[in-house]
Amino acid sequence: MTMTSRVGSISASESEINVRTAGQKNLVIVGATGMVGGYALRYALEHSAVGRATTIGRRKVGISHPKLKEVLHQDFTDCSALAEVLSHQHAAIFCLGAYTGAVSDTALRTITVDYTIEFARVLHGSSPDAAFAFLSGSGADPTGRSRISFARYKGEAENALLARGFASVYTFRPAYIYPVTPRREPNFGYRLLRAIYPAFRLMFPYQVIRADDLGRAMVDVAVRGTEGRQGVIFENRNIQAIVE
């Protein structure tokens, strides 16, 4: 099923889905065409606790599944049109982001901070009891003192999510994310890390995480929670422990 946020209408089979998924969780995934979000989506579709998975993004995910509903939305600086789509959601997995160096610093902050805050605003207004699982990064600095833009912006986004008032916020801070499936790497550093991954993993076992394991961990935590704690930070070692 596919719909666009411009139309804002729900497909005819929506009521059938609601009946079929009674007792299960409704999960929304932002960034499902990306590496981690793609694995999270595939795992969610097979997860027994997930009754419906809604993807929100600029492009179609290229998957057909009875649990899946796709929403195409182009402007993440304004998510107001998503209000109806985001109602009755139990959890969100937010994997939208950009690589440092792939965009300007201004664009990096817009994508990392502004997009996250705007989506969270609308989600919380439509589903105030929803949990929020956020893909941050190792070294994220909520104090804002880091000289690294990526760390400052991820920290700023983390702070904004905690301040929004969600029932639960789960922050994932992976170190090097191993792509698993070959891809075109965004820069030389990633090409190098992929080439030396076997040795790097042996030397620094707690500084790597497979993309599929990360996606799986985010889904598991989003739908099952962590014993009612409102804010939980998962560093790379913690993420590994979830999927072991």
Image (cartoon, helix red, strand yellow):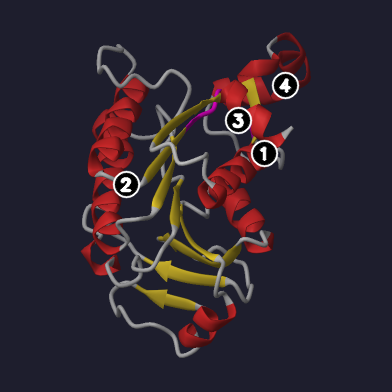
Range of magenta residues: 172-178
N-terminal label among 4 and 3:
4
Q: Give whichever of 110, 89 is nearer the camera.
A: 89
SS at badge 3: helix
Residue in view at x 41 percent, y 77 percent: 3
Quick check: is 43 in the magenta stretch?
no
User: Cβ–Cβ below 8 Å for labels 4 and 3?
Assistant: no
List x then y, in percent, for residue 51.
57, 69
Q: Which residue is at 41% across, 49% downward?
A: 131
Nearest-to-viewer mark from 4 and 1: 1
Residue beneath disc 4 = 197
Q: Can you see residue 59?
A: no
Quadrant showing the C terminus:
top right
Q: Amino acid at mark 3?
A: Ile
Which mark lies nearer to you, 1 or 3?
Answer: 3
Report which residue position mark 1 lands on: 213
Query: Disc 2 or 1, which lies upstream in sequence?
Result: 2
Q: Is residue 13 above or below residue 180?
A: below
Instruction: Bin the neighbour count of mark 1 within 10 Å (Cα to Cα): few under 14, some 14-19, many 20 and up.
Output: many
Task: Describe the element under mark 4 as helix, strand or loop.
Answer: helix
Q: Which residue, given by chain and number where applicable, does mark 2 sit on? A: 166
Q: Is residue 24 above or below residue 203?
A: below
State how far apart marks 3 and 2 are (Cα). Answer: 21 Å
Disc 4 marks a residue whose amino acid type is Tyr
Can the viewer see residue 148 in this picture? yes
